[in-house]
Amino acid sequence: MTTERNVFEIEGLECAYDHNGRNGKNVILRIERLSVPMGSLSIILGLSGSGKSTLIETLGLMNHTIHSGFFTYFHAENKVVIDRDTWNCPSALATIRNRHFSFIFQHDFLMPYYTPEENMLIGSLIQGSDKTGSRAKEEMGNLCLKMGLDPGGISRKKACELSVGQKQRLSFIRAIIKDYDVIFGDEPAGNLDELNSGLLMDVLKDSVHQNDRRSAILVSHDIPLSVANADCLIVLSPAAEDTYEVLQENVFSRTATGWSGGDNVRMADDQIDTKIRKIICEKKSLSAP
């Protein structure tokens, strides 16, 4: 694989969770080879339980799921190879997460008795960023307006007094206001209506595309929203009982003439939508032992 313009390159990766010290007894996700493009919004699609969250937990260094194989993270002309042994140095992993990554979770994880402003800045403060002064406050105000939040109205409340949708948008702003190279999102629009989901995607795309060193990797169940906004679609498919995989032919890139997959056939949005639904629901026959 070429290293040009990829933020992650995966080789022979098998992911499993360690239950009572038995890591690897039940591999839930296999990826023989996958390149995630830099400077793009990539969205991972698949059925519930197919390993979508596992994949971003692994790439985002949030959870030790590596049973075998490795992946390479590229940033600022440097690269870091991550495998099982890398997890023997948790401080090094924490440094990478803090300096380079930002996260949007399904739950907002706001500090309930902090103000919205304090919550939005907490990631930058932990990172040691200088984005905590008047310019940061101006940026926060602009982002609030883009996300349909009234900066003056929410400033008079604590986070615990906000609605679920307001909290979700606030946690999103907290993630993108931080200096980041890769932003990971686990269903970031899951608690939002169609209008606010679209606003979130517009702001995220602007954040990524205005800086070619930035990348976003999201998990979603919403196929139409993903097709409408992604630069790259990564579709998980069933491989065997309780195991899923990413095949090269199930990775699609947006081009000027439509979506392109491993067979280089161009597809319109409605065609790729249909194809994705077929892939994620396809059942593989299991070989007899």
Image: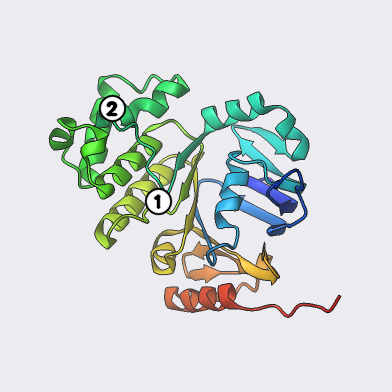
Q: Is residue 82 left or right of residue 125?
A: right
Callout 2: helix, strand or loop?
Answer: loop
Which quarter shows the C terminus?
Answer: bottom right
Q: Earlier in the sequence, mark 1 or mark 2?
A: 2
Give residue 61's quadrant in the image. top right
Residue type at the position of mark 1:
Pro
- Disc on res. 188: 1
Rendered residue at 74%/30% (across/down): 88
Rendered residue at 33%/47% (across/down): 203
Rendered residue at 53%/27% (across/down): 99
Rendered residue at 13%/36% (across/down): 153
Specify the farthest residue to the right: 289
Callout 1: helix, strand or loop?
Answer: loop
Give residue 189's quadrant in the image. bottom left
Which of pointers 1 and 2 indicates the residue nearer the eye? 2
Give residue 133's quadrant in the image. top left
Against 268, residue 155 (above or below) is above
Residue type at the position of mark 2:
Tyr
Q: State the image coordinates of residue 288 (x, y, percent, origin top left).
A: 84, 79
Mark 2 surroundings within 10 Å by alpha-carbon count, few (fewer than 14), some (14 through 19), many (20 or more): some
Against 129, residue 264 (above or below) is below
Residue wearing tag 2:
114
Q: State the image coordinates of residue 210 (x, y, percent, origin top left).
A: 40, 42
Residue 246 makes an appearance in the image: no
Q: Is residue 240 left or right of residue 141?
A: right
Q: State the image coordinates of residue 286 (x, y, percent, origin top left).
A: 76, 77
Q: State the image coordinates of residue 256 (x, y, percent, origin top left).
A: 46, 65
Mark 1 surroundings within 10 Å by alpha-carbon count, few (fewer than 14), some (14 through 19), many (20 or more): many
Q: Is residue 59 left or right of residue 174?
A: right
